[in-house]
Image: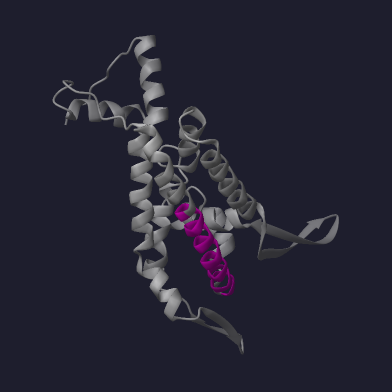
């Protein structure tokens, strides 16, 4: 396999960086590879319009609703009990949890068209969208961010020796609990250390998955609210 090096002018390089930032490509290599794949540079990779981004967001929100995890939670009571030093769980399988988390990640990462931050830019930059819809989006986003910033029920107790023994408690926010699982085990390994702290101990893992159930249901509810706002906003962009 041959490797090629492409030298770009400063203006073209700046243009490509802007396209990458706005269009969700991982890096310059991914963008240029897509260029080469598209009829040998005869057409540019497609850049979605604001309407298409909102429609894509809504399609993924609909997909989110279809996962089996929600049916499981409707029909089963998630429990975790400790008895005699052992733990027994009635929790959904990992696969049931991972599927919606992978979709939820699309709403979190700014390299994706439909991240919440990218969707907020649509509402900020389009005066055609009524203020009441913009306000509804801002309010729902603010409420969800407040939830993510709250301390979860999970904490880690540790002993630190600094001249003398000192008891230390580390508290984790809902966002930290979610990201440790998502970016430490499921989607990436960039937060593996956080994942191991929060989930490696079987007692911690069981309790923390109870937290995850609360967090991802709240996340889903937020996404569905935004979906409804998007549906009302789309006609104003046509």
Give the magenta range. 203-224
Instruction: Give the image location of residue 230, x and y in percent.
Output: 42, 44
Q: Residue at x 43, y 40 (%)?
A: 233
Q: Looking at the rendering, which quadrant does residue 41 occupy?
A: top left
Instruction: Give the image location of residue 163, x and y in percent.
Output: 86, 55
Instruction: Give the image location of residue 116, x and y in percent.
Output: 48, 43
Q: Tell me if I can see residue 112 in this picture.
A: no
Against 209, residue 38 (above or below) is above
Asked if the magenta segment contains residue 216, the reply would be: yes
Q: Residue at x 32, y 32 (%)?
A: 48
Residue located farthest toward the right when viewing the structure as drawn: 164
- From the image, which quarter does the N terminus lie in? top left
Along the line of sight, which residue is nearer the eye, 183 or 197?
A: 183
Asked if the magenta segment contains residue 161, the reply would be: no
Q: Residue at x 50, y 38 (%)?
A: 117
Along the line of sight, which residue is nearer the eye, 208 or 193?
A: 208
Q: Residue at x 33, y 57 (%)?
A: 63
- Magenta stretch: helix, strand or loop mostly: helix
Against 25, residue 143 (above or below) is below
């Amino acid at each position: 396999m041959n490797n090629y090096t492409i030298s770009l002018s400063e203006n073209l390089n700046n243009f490509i960086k802007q396209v990458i930032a706005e269009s969700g490509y991982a890096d310059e290599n991914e963008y240029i590879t897509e260029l080469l794949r598209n009829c040998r540079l005869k057409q540019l990779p497609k850049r979605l319009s604001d309407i298409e981004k909102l429609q894509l967001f809504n399609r993924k929100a609909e997909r989110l609703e279809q996962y089996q995890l929600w049916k499981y939670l409707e029909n089963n009571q998630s429990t975790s009990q400790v008895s005699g030093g052992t733990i027994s769980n009635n929790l959904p399988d990992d696969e049931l949890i991972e599927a919606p988390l992978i979709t939820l990640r699309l709403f979190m990462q700014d390299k994706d068209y439909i991240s919440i931050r990218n969707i907020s830019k649509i509402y900020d930059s389009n005066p055609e969208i009524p203020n009441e819809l913009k306000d509804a989006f801002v309010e729902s986003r603010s409420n969800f961010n407040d939830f993510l910033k709250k301390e979860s029920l999970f904490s880690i107790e540790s002993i630190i020796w600094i001249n003398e023994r000192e008891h230390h408690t580390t508290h984790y926010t809902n966002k930290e609990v979610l990201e440790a699982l998502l970016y430490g085990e499921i989607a990436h390994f960039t937060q593996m250390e956080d994942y191991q702290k929060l989930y490696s101990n079987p007692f911690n893992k069981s309790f923390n998955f109870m937290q995850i159930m609360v967090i991802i249901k709240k996340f889903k509810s937020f996404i569905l609210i935004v979906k409804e706002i998007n549906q009302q906003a789309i006609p104003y962009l046509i």
